[in-house]
Image (cartoon, rainbow, N blue to C red):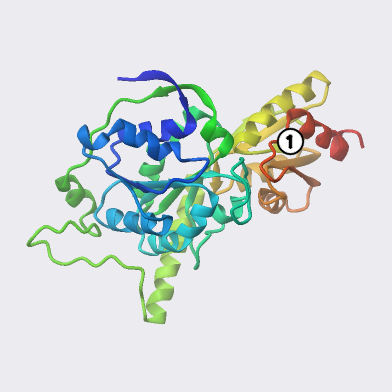
Amino acid sequence: MEEIRLMKGNEVIAEAAVRCGCDGYFGYPITPQSEVLETLMELKPWETTGMVVLQAESEIASINMLYGGAASGKRVMTSSSSPGISLMSEGISYLAGAELPCVIVNVSRGGPGLGTIQPGQADYFQATKGGGHGDYNMIVLAPFSVQEMNDFLALSFDLAFQYRTPVMILSDGVIGQMMEKVTLGPQQPRRTDEYILKHYGSWAVTGKKGRGRNIVTSVELDPARHELFNLRLQEKYRRIRESEVRYEQIHCEDADHVLVAYGSSARIGEKVVEMARVDGYKVGLLRPITLWPFPMEAVGALSRRVKGMLSVEMSSGQMVEDVRLACEGRIPVGHYGRMGGIVHSPSDVYNALKEQFLQK
């Protein structure tokens, strides 16, 4: 049955993992997401659902453990923060190349390098442009509330298995550390080996005798066959772009100017829209929920009737490149961002909006 609690975003990731029937979590502590592993250790799901929870020796080890678990058809996941995701990038590319489903949670912080333990949104390129080597993408979901941290976990597993691809939940230190009321779903059963064989027998390694040998790999030494494989991947990504774009529009129906923001920046953007409307300015907010696939058509449609857009990010400007691509030069597109772990205030963003657009 459903349950309502007051929880941190990181805590609810752990709770949702258990409740959605996750088979295994393999991770390594790093601020600001360490509560995910800590909460799982407190929950002890190995005693109730049989879920494996393991602190690996490193981020590199944890992502490769996901490869093994996913190859067995299991629901496996990890979580980390920005530098840890960098260490996982090679393994993520392997998972994409082997078409293995898994969930990766990134509670991002400021960089580059070790940077700061404070919130950041400068992992946009890393998440949406692949991050690792080769021509691949992964679905990227950007929650802006603790409730969405809960809801997106089960959704991520569904998408990962539907398309046989890694899925990333790209959160940030604000959402991960803040506390809000959240409605938790009922406990879902873990899937049996028989279920896995029936639904995923063509690729999942089960180790059962008499089933033959199934090698899961991303290696292909024949150039022609490798190109055909990559073309098939690109066709899959085309289907994802057609079917899985998610976004929210707030007061965009009559807007003259639109903010584009995700995650905690979108929460701030909601307040900016409210402030601007009180002052008589018709401002709206478009919140991408999937950062990949990015809502190019929705942004493009707005650019045909509004006067300008402002991309708001806790970075020097990354998502703004996709906003400009979607707008195709039809309108001016500005950027406002803070770095170093500094979270912008609604007044900061509103002043930038007025300076770049409203007072001209």
- Which residue is found at the position 52% from the left and 57% from the top? 86
Res. 240 in view? yes
Say whether residue 69 is left or right of residue 267: left
Q: Nearer the viewer, residue 155 or 20?
A: 20
Residue 20's x, y, as percent?
A: 32, 35
- Which residue is found at the position 36% from the left and 46% from the top? 77
Q: Nearer the viewer, residue 168 or 82?
A: 82
Say whether residue 340 is left or right of residue 181: right
- Which residue is found at the position 48% from the left and 44% from the top? 244
Residue 281's x, y, as percent?
A: 82, 26
Say whether residue 63 is left or right of residue 304: left
Question: In the image, is residue 335 above or below residue 286?
Answer: below
Question: How many numbered marks, from 0 up?
Answer: 1
> What amino acid is found at the position of numbered circle 1 in the picture?
Val
Say whether residue 121 is left or right of residue 157: right
Q: Which residue is mark 1?
A: 258
Q: Secondary structure at mark 1?
A: strand
Which of the 4 quarters of the picture holds residue 67?
Answer: bottom left
Res. 19 in view? no
